[in-house]
Image: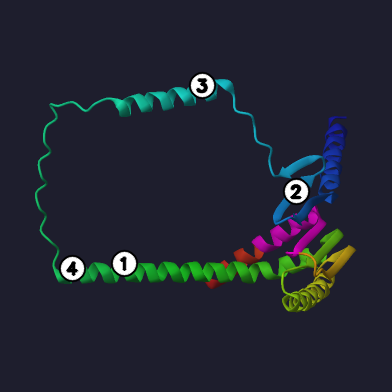
Amino acid sequence: MIGWIILIIFGGLTLIIAFLCMLSVRAYIEYKDKQFTATVKYLFITVYPRPEKPEKPQKKQKKQKIKKTKKQIKQQPAPDNLETPQPDTPQKPASPTEESAKKLVKDVKDANKNKLDLEMIMLLIDSAASPFKKLLHKTRVHNFEVSFIIGGDDAAKIAISYGIHSAAVGVFMVWLREAVRLKVKEVSVTADFNREETMQYFRCVVKIRLFTALVALAHFGIKVYKEKKSSK
């Protein structure tokens, strides 16, 4: 009987964990009026940005008291009976040979450190390429909106800017359609010769299943471990 109860509890927990892993993490991204905003949610929980906790009155009063005490200490006059500090005994300067040897050792240590940092960066980039590519292919982007209204005080510059923006948006959309699962709502590039400055607007919702993200992270960790083990 106890074995069945344990089995039922274990099976229930497994189903709950599997259900939670199959849900998506959603990122709401928007760029408007030169301001970028991003909100990440899982279920009904806002993961980013975290809401600021209101400061407790006791902690606030304690901080104010500490500041007041420090201010009073600074305002107190220094006593007159302080002893005049004696000058330190001059140390014997190091010889040129010792200085050269120390500098050489330091340069070698810095070179080795920079080499290790560069090797670690290259290892992380190489290990992240494959998991990141697979993660992108399973990422869903919904309600994708991009809008550029080109403006300015010179008609020739507006025309050139319109051409550059149109080409850049076209290339980016081709890459994005191949990289992720994309649902486009609106993509537009227009020129307004009566507008003083260019208006840029971008908005989308990015969805990634938690299980997919965890698998990609595990794949990345395994690749880093194998690469480090083989390089030793």
Task: Tell me the mark number nearer the camera, choosing from 3 and 1.
Answer: 3
Left or right of 223, for residue 21: right
Q: Secondary structure at mark 2?
A: strand
Number of marks in picture: 4
Mark 2 vs mark 4, foreground winner is 2
**13 relative position to 115: left or right:** right
Distance, label 4 to label 3, CA atoms, is: 56 Å
4 vs 3, front mark: 3
Q: Secondary structure at mark 1?
A: helix
Highlighted range, magenta: 196-221
In terms of sequence position, does the residue under pointer 4 or pointer 3 come before the other? 3
First in sequence, mark 2 or 4: give its number: 2
For discs 2 and 3, the disc positioned in front in the rendered view: 3
Give how far across and how far down residue 185 sits, in percent: 90, 61
Mark 2 or 1, closer to the camera:
2
Which label sits on residue 40? Answer: 2
| Alpha carbon separation for disc pair 1 and 4 | 12 Å
The CA distance from mark 2 to mark 3 is 34 Å
Rendered location of residue 15, percent (x, y) = 86, 43
- Around disc 2, counting alpha carbons within 10 Å, would you say few (fewer than 14), some (14 to 19), or many (20 or more)? some
Q: Which mark is residue 106?
A: 1
Question: What is the distance, in whole Å, between disc 3 and disc 1 at their CAs?
Answer: 49 Å
Q: Residue at x 86, y 65 (%)?
A: 181
Residue 212 within the segment the image draws in magenta: yes
